[in-house]
Image (spheres, rainbow, N blue to C red):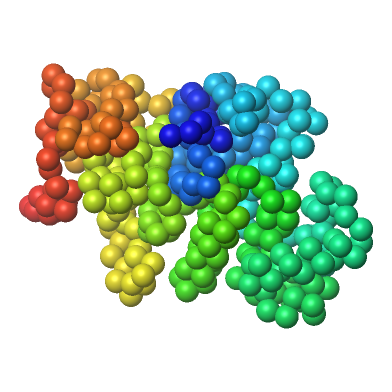
Amino acid sequence: MSDPLLALAGLHVRFPTRRGDVRAVDGIDLTLHAGETVGLVGESGCGKSAAVRAILRLHPERTTRYAGAIRFDGANLLDADEAGIRRIRGQEIAMIFQDPMTSLNPVMTIGDQIGEGLAAHEKLSRADRRKRVLELLTLVGIPSPQTRVDAFPHQFSGGMRQRVVIAIALACNPRVVLADEITTALDVTLQAQILELLRALSARLGMATLMISHDLGVVAGMTSRVYVMYGGRIVETAATDELFEHPAMPYTWGLLRSAPNLEKPDALRLTPIPGLPPDLLAPPAGCRFAARCPFARPICTAREPGLAAPAGRPPAHLARCWGTQDVADGGWLIGHDWQSAAAEEAAP
Ligand SMILES: Nc1ncnc2c1ncn2[C@@H]1O[C@H](COP(=O)(O)OP(=O)(O)OP(=O)(O)O)[C@@H](O)[C@H]1O
Ligand SMILES: [Mg+2]
């Protein structure tokens, strides 16, 4: 495979507080290749937003500590100066934010907001800029763009606003799009439409897309690879089909059981994972999921496992779980099928 376009290598993001450092991202590796759509999933608070916001250095510089590297196009973005980062933002790497209402300016027309990004990065005449704004509105599926272009955000529905936010992100033909929980505020039907739009646009424009979600169901149909994050760490990664068919870590089993099915919204069968995620001020010494894992053994709380291919699985599938590793004291979950394991767990 070619070199990745974007690579997080041993990335740490820490927020110093009076009670100590919040270790929101604790040494993660993640790669994104040109044209690829990759998922980053995990429960609320596991560090997903902290990691992706670090890519564009959106955290307040004074109250954030970074370590490791964010490689893009041969440079480490953590070393870039303010001007360098400003050039990357929007033009090379664009972010679509979680909440379309707060990321749009309520007193500016939709057309002006899309045009603003164009004006900052591309030298276009007024007429050409307007033409490009209309093209972008058409591209994201806004009906009658000629009349909608001069409307304000409150005149748009939630789904239409999310399309506008996508148009703003696409304005400068970015090479990478970071999409952080972009469908969380939408109902299931609109979610599916927006995801399909983003999938089609990524394929058509050849962008690399990182889809962030707390919901495995959202990334299922969209991505070719998935990273699962827990307590500031990557705990499992694999090709999407492999992850869904052979999830290795009991945490991933739990996420799969709690994922709503977007194709069959009526078939919601949500089983939340009991217990709470670890305290990121003082993460536990062993596996970070051990306290909530029904299959944990003493080794799990004593030592943290590394990321390794679960026995019998392809080398690109990595999991941070002693139960799946063929080493001394490990391996009790090898060949265990998660659905029967779930039944076993539910049995009295
Ligand atoms: N500026 C900050 N100062 C202190 N702690 C922070 C700060 N920003 C985030 N955190 C903490 O870092 C951890 C990770 O937060 P993050 O927002 O990355 O979670 P997330 O995975 O994106 O969750 P969600 O699904 O709810 O968006 C949380 O414990 C959060 O409280
Ligand atoms: Mg978040």
Which residue is rendered at x = 63% and y = 72% of the image?
Answer: 141
Side of 172 relative to 348 (left or right): right
Quarter of the image that includes the N terminus: top left
Q: Position of residue 331 (x, y in %)?
A: 14, 29
Q: Toward the viewer: 96 or 272?
A: 96
Side of 205 relative to 83 (left or right): left
Q: Based on the displayed image, in which of its 4 quarters is residue 251 positioned?
A: top left
* Numbered disc total: 0
Q: Toward the viewer: 323 or 296?
A: 323
Which residue is rendered at x = 66% and y = 37% of the image?
Answer: 56
Which residue is rendered at x = 58% and y = 28% of the image?
Answer: 70
Vertical side of 323 occupied by 160: above or below: below
Which residue is rendered at x = 28% and y = 47% of the image?
Answer: 242
Vertical side of 183 occupied by 21: above or below: above
Q: Based on the displayed image, in which of its 4 quarters is residue 16 positioned?
A: top right
Vertical side of 178 occupied by 145: above or below: below
Q: Position of residue 19 (x, y in %)?
A: 55, 25
Q: Toward the viewer: 22 or 312?
A: 312
Vertical side of 88 occupied by 41: above or below: below
Side of 265 relative to 310 (left or right): right
Q: Position of residue 243 (x, y in %)?
A: 30, 46
Q: Position of residue 295 (x, y in %)?
A: 17, 38
Q: Is residue 16 visible?
A: no
Side of 132 relative to 174 (left or right): right
Q: Toward the viewer: 232 or 285?
A: 232
